Image (tube, rainbow, N blue to C red):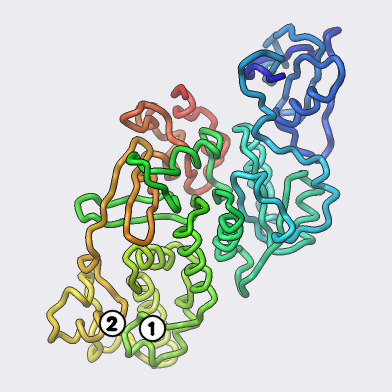
Amino acid sequence: MPFNSGSHGSCCRGNPAALLHISPPGTLVGPSACAGLCSNTTGCRAFSHGRRWNNCQLCSACNLTAVGGNRGYRSWSFGTGLDSPAASWEWWPDNASRTDFALSSFDVRRYDVFTLCSLHFWRERRDLVVGFFAHLRDVNTSGFLVTPSAPLCRDVTASLGVACVSTQSYRLDGALSKERWRVILHCLQRQHRIAYAGLDVRFLHPVRTLLHETGSSQKGSAVDVGFEGAFDRRAGRVSSFTPDLAWGFPTSRAIGFLTSLTSQLRERSLDGLPEYMRREPSLLAYNVMGPAEQDLLRDALLGYLYNRSVAVNKYQLALGGAEDLCRRLGRCVSPHTNASLPECPPGGGRDTPPTSPSHWACGAAAVLGEAALERLPFAPSGLGGVVTSPTLTAFLSDGKGVMSGARACNGARPTACVAPPHGRRPLAIHCGGKDPACLTLAGCPCLRIQL
């Protein structure tokens, strides 16, 4: 039987209707876990969840009160026709006893979102991991953690009771910035849609809402992937995107894009750069071998959208590496330190005169200027928009579906939280700088906008 929606206050704290008080040490307990316990307890007709105290109070009846310490609780009781808080949250009481943390043996179909945690981050900022999964439970979302080692997974599951996967496929990727794309691909290959979110992302709806509402364009065409990003409508091009919030759908084009991306992540290559840079293998040491970070990922996304090699941001990284190489070793393969070398201008190489040195150096490589990229169709919606090409269809939040920045929550006016034209709050907030007030959503005006 379903429960009604949560009300502030306690049902049976300190009165005869109390059946059982549960506060498992070292375990995160959310409303969904309490709902499952109540469903399996004879005589339980209601329950209260105390977030501050990490506990459940199971009750034979609900006499709601919000006086004194009862204000720290939310309560649910059996009702009719309303969603159960347990319906969308897969609570695994045996997580702490798991010993096999391999991705290949993990049932990803139980989950809507995952996040990453390195060994260093677990040691230094465990509070962010705890806060992220407590938040997921608050928004009735099932999630799992990806770490680089089985011992770390054992520590996490023993401490938090959350589902954990251990996988690291790339050398020098302890932070798993490359691994996230392999995990998304793994899920899509199993015909399961999935989202990745950084630990500083907070959702204002269940993640399944994000996946549902961005899975197709307004014209009904299927979306392959989604990002927190922006589209320049005047120029007709993707202007920015961040890998801190990304999701994919099990389409052949999404799988093709991620297969291409994960193969690029393994390459140590100077492909796409001007010839004078390709002659200097020492540049490989300057993080130009694969799109692990945001700037190189934009090259990969644009390359797949346009079905051609793009190395705009890779060239900028190579310039910085070449200047450092010149200072340290006197090997100057940058036009900034060697005037005889042609520089790829901001306008790019392919849109320069065919007789110019820049056209030879840049246009013959993959250093495309922004002006050389064709316009792409973009269909805006209340939560962002969909950019379409013959090879990929991508949803971009475009400043609507996801609010970003250090002041995205507490610094925002309530009216700024509404995504027109539907007059509803956005899907998520990206707390730039990991601002604690934003991470806890304390006083966030977006929460005052009704669903």
Callout 2: 10 Å neighbours few (<14), some, many (20+)?
some
| Residue 29 lies in quadrant | top right
Q: Secondary structure at mark 2?
A: loop
| Residue 320 lies in quadrant | bottom left
User: Is residue 259 at least partly visible in the picture?
Assistant: yes
User: Is residue 197 at least partly visible in the picture?
Assistant: no
Would residue 331 be found to the left or right of residue 148 on screen?
Answer: left
Image location of residue 154, percent across then percent down: 80, 55
**Label 2 with label 1: CB-CB less than 8 Å:** yes
Image location of residue 128, percent across then percent down: 63, 46
The disc, 2 or 1, on the residue closer to the chain's N-terminal end is 1
Identify the image quadrant of the N terminus.
top right
- Amino acid type shown at disc 1: Ala
The residue under label 2 is: 336
Q: Which numbered dot is residue 322?
A: 1
Above/below status of 386 relative to 312: above
Image location of residue 404, percent across then percent down: 42, 44
| Residue 176 lies in quadrant | bottom right
Count of numbered badges drawn on the protein: 2
Would residue 250 be found to the left or right of residue 18 on screen?
Answer: left
